[in-house]
Image: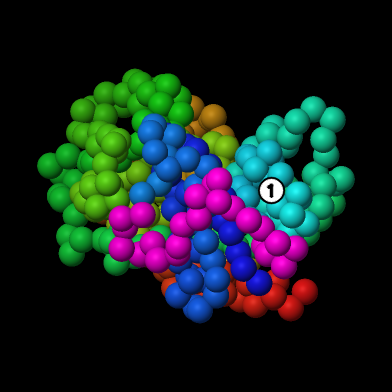
């Protein structure tokens, strides 16, 4: 079974593209035939580069793609029209759902996933629940991984007394993040004056890792999300995460706040899987600006006081990151493909 991975024409390759490319590299390294098929290979829409050392899968230009009924054609959920080559060739088509929010919005009017000859894989347990509810199909979970050799905690963080460093990413709902910052500023001006904001934007992975390693807190403002990687990377770098789950983050995010915490800590209404770690962050409902700002205040207070709550939460965060390594992702990919090859 040959596997071909469609790469969408995005302006900048983000986490989702990286995950797909790594999947292809894992399969190639295992001796399987796997290929990357970028929709565009030049100009603003290329969204990929074959220069990174871990990318070992061969590339097939879009206009040279020739699928057969024995092939597997893998397409991200937001690009339903890209399934056409697979349908036309009678190939097996797998939709890898990395963000639940695009699964239905990308469908042309009058088209239903229930009527299309596809199978699914989901990036997280919450996304698999969404797929099952909206398509009637079960989707095996294929979680992403983070490079824990790159994203790792330093031997020591800067002294919080010299300034509490709060990392954030403006590409994740920038206006809302600014509202959280403004609200936090007005909750406690003295505490806010002791905080420095570390903006992470336009940096290579090494720069992101360096910024996170220098920070005490990470503000997660992304939603919707399938299985958000920045909070995991922040956990690996020794940051206390605060913010939103984006629905899909509930695959690994667990509340560190006590039930009687003010404001009442957010808990998912949907079933969450059992995990071996405890509370690993201060989580609010998506778009709850005041809740996130209040939890940010709690996090900053913990950091200044070197609270036992902080050390416990950071230990759980480290355990969480250790469950999402590239080795674990590689094992999951090869295990799923072994099943696909026999069904």
Q: Is residue 20 left or right of residue 170?
A: right
Whether residue 296 is visible to the viewer of this picture, yes or no, is: no
Residue 311 found in image quarter: bottom left
Q: Which residue is mark 1?
A: 85
Q: Residue furthest left?
A: 162
**Which residue is at 19% across, 55% downward?**
157
Mark 1 secondary-structure assignment: helix
Whether residue 159 is visible to the viewer of this picture, yes or no, is: yes
Percent x, y of residue 262: 50, 37
Q: How many marks?
A: 1
Magenta span main SS: loop
- Between 225 and 215, the one lying in front of the other is 225
Q: Is residue 151 left or right of residue 73?
A: left
Q: Residues within 10 Å of mark 1 (few under 14, many from 20)?
A: some
**Which residue is at 48% across, 71% downward?**
28
Q: Is residue 54 left or right of residue 338?
A: left
- Between 180 and 103, the one lying in front of the other is 103
**Which residue is at 69% across, 41% downward?**
80
Percent x, y of residue 263: 52, 36
Q: Quadrant of the N terminus?
A: bottom right
Q: Quadrant of the C terminus?
A: bottom right
- Between 276 and 126, the one lying in front of the other is 126
**Can residue 156 be found in the magenta stretch?**
no
Determine whether 169 is above or below 208 in the image.
above
**Can residue 54 be found in the magenta stretch?**
yes
Which residues make up the magenta segment?
50-72
Percent x, y of residue 318: 38, 64
Residue 194 found in image quarter: top left
Determine whether 221 is above or below 151 in the image.
above
Percent x, y of residue 298: 38, 41
């Amino acid at each position: 079974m040959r596997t071909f991975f469609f790469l969408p024409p995005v302006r900048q390759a983000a986490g989702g593209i990286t995950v797909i490319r790594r999947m292809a590299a894992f399969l190639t390294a295992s001796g399987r035939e796997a290929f990357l098929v970028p929709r565009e290979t030049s100009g603003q829409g290329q969204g990929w580069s074959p220069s990174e050392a871990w990318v070992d899968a061969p590339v097939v230009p879009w206009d040279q793609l020739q699928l057969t009924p024995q092939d597997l054609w893998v397409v991200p959920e937001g690009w339903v029209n890209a399934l056409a080559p697979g349908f036309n060739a009678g190939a097996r088509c797998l939709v890898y759902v990395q963000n639940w929010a695009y699964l239905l919005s990308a469908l042309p009017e009058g088209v239903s996933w229930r009527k299309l000859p596809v199978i699914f894989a989901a990036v997280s347990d919450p996304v698999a629940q969404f797929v099952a509810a909206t398509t009637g199909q079960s989707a095996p979970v294929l979680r992403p991984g983070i490079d824990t050799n790159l994203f790792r905690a330093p031997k020591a963080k800067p002294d919080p007394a010299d300034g509490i460093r709060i990392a954030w990413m403006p590409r994740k709902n920038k206006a809302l993040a600014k509202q959280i910052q403004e609200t936090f500023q007005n909750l406690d001006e003295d505490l806010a004056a002791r905080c420095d904001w570390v903006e992470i934007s336009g940096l290579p992975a090494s720069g992101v890792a360096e910024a996170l390693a220098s920070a005490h807190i990470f503000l997660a403002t992304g939603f919707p999300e399938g299985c958000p990687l920045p909070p995991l990377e922040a956990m690996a770098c020794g940051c206390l995460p605060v913010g939103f789950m984006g629905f899909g983050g509930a695959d690994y995010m667990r509340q560190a706040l006590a039930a009687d915490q003010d404001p009442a800590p957010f808990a998912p209404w949907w079933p969450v899987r059992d995990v071996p770690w405890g509370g690993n962050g201060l989580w609010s409902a998506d778009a709850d600006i005041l809740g996130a700002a209040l939890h940010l205040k709690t996090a900053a207070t913990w950091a200044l006081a070197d609270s036992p709550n902080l050390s416990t939460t950071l230990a759980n965060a480290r355990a969480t990151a250790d469950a999402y390594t590239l080795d674990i992702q590689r094992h999951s990919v090869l295990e799923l493909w072994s099943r696909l090859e026999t069904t």
